[in-house]
Image: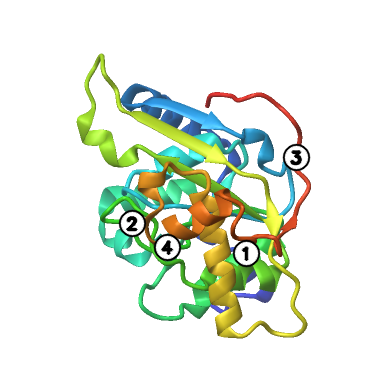
């Protein structure tokens, strides 16, 4: 039997999950994080309370979503590598959280369309611009994907940096490793007349990585360490072209 257009529109996509179910799972994950780590969140007031935005994060370990989701009180849609579809437990967890799978090593146009649809719907899209977790703990080159989506959808980027998830194996009952999450102020990419070329998008992706790196300890800054140090010393002004977005509110540091 043919499916009508209206019926097709009602079909839920994998990232469209129940808000109630999502937040129940989020609270459970927050509890687990507080058991495994001395888990702290800084800058939660910088997350816009509504409207579309991209949450850009670094990537250290496969449990990173457990550090990110409890820090954000809004429901997230998360980008993940398609390899996790074959891992039964991870696949179930990601589907509960709301996920868009991305084929690595190629331009996944369906994933891009889904991301733009998420942003057009006013949701919060979480992604790791690096694309894959760092084997050294330091930041890696950020491909142009995050810059393409932010410029195409004209939405702010909220940088989020964390560290400590890679130390989960060091857990001890009375000596838990630290996991620190810092959320920076939202910003817009520079303006550009017409369609930005690849080299411009690559440069903008670097700016996003620099914003993340500024909130990380020096040992986690990877290939961006020297550029971040120059910014901190006032010798570099490459972030000056970014346009600040209004912060949501002012507030104190909070725990999940």
Give the labeled residue for mark 1.
238
Quick one: label 4 or label 1, which is nearer the N terminus? 4
Asked if the residues shown at circle 1 and circle 2 are in contact, with their CB atoms under 8 angstroms apart, the answer is no
Quick one: label 1 or label 3, which is nearer the N terminus? 1
Quick one: label 3 or label 4, which is nearer the N terminus? 4
Q: Of the numbered discs in the image, which one, if any, rests on residue 130?
A: 4
**Mark 1–mark 2 distance (CA, rounded to whole Å):** 26 Å
The image shows residue 183, relative to residue 171, as above or below, that is below
Asked if the residues shown at circle 4 and circle 1 are in contact, with their CB atoms under 8 angstroms apart, the answer is no
Quick one: label 3 or label 2, which is nearer the N terminus? 2
Asked if the residues shown at circle 4 and circle 2 are in contact, with their CB atoms under 8 angstroms apart, the answer is yes
Question: Few, some or many C-alpha atoms within 10 Å of disc 3 (few <14, some 14-19, many ≥20)?
Answer: some
Give the labeled residue for mark 2.
133
Side (left or right) of 77 relative to 188:
left
The secondary element bearing badge 3 is classed as: loop
**Mark 1–mark 3 distance (CA, rounded to whole Å):** 25 Å
Give the labeled residue for mark 3.
248
Side (left or right) of 9 relative to 213:
right
**Mark 4–mark 2 distance (CA, rounded to whole Å):** 7 Å
């Amino acid at each position: 039997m043919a499916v009508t257009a209206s019926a097709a529109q009602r079909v839920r996509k994998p990232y469209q999950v129940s808000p109630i179910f999502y937040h129940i799972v989020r609270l459970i994950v927050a509890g687990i994080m507080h058991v495994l780590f001395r888990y702290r969140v800084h800058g939660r007031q910088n997350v816009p309370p509504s409207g579309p935005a991209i949450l850009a994060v670094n990537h250290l370990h496969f449990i990173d979503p457990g550090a990110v989701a409890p820090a954000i009180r809004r429901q997230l849609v998360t980008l993940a590598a398609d390899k996790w579809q074959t891992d039964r437990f991870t696949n179930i967890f990601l589907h509960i959280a709301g996920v868009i799978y991305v084929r690595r090593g190629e331009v996944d146009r369906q994933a891009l369309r889904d991301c733009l649809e998420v942003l057009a719907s006013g949701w919060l899209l979480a992604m790791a611009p690096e694309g894959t977790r760092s084997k050294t703990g330091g930041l890696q080159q950020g491909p142009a994907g995050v810059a393409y989506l932010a410029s195409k959808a004209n939405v702010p980027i909220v940088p989020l940096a964390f560290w400590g998830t890679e130390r989960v194996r060091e857990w001890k009952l009375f000596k838990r490793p630290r996991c620190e999450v810092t959320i920076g102020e939202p910003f817009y990419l520079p303006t550009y007349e017409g369609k930005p070329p690849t080299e411009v998008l690559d440069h903008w992706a670097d700016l996003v990585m620099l914003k993340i790196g500024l909130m990380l300890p020096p040992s986690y800054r990877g290939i961006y360490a020297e550029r971040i140090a120059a910014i901190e010393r006032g010798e570099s002004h490459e972030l000056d072209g970014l346009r600040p977005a209004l912060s949501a509110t002012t507030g104190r540091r909070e725990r999940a």
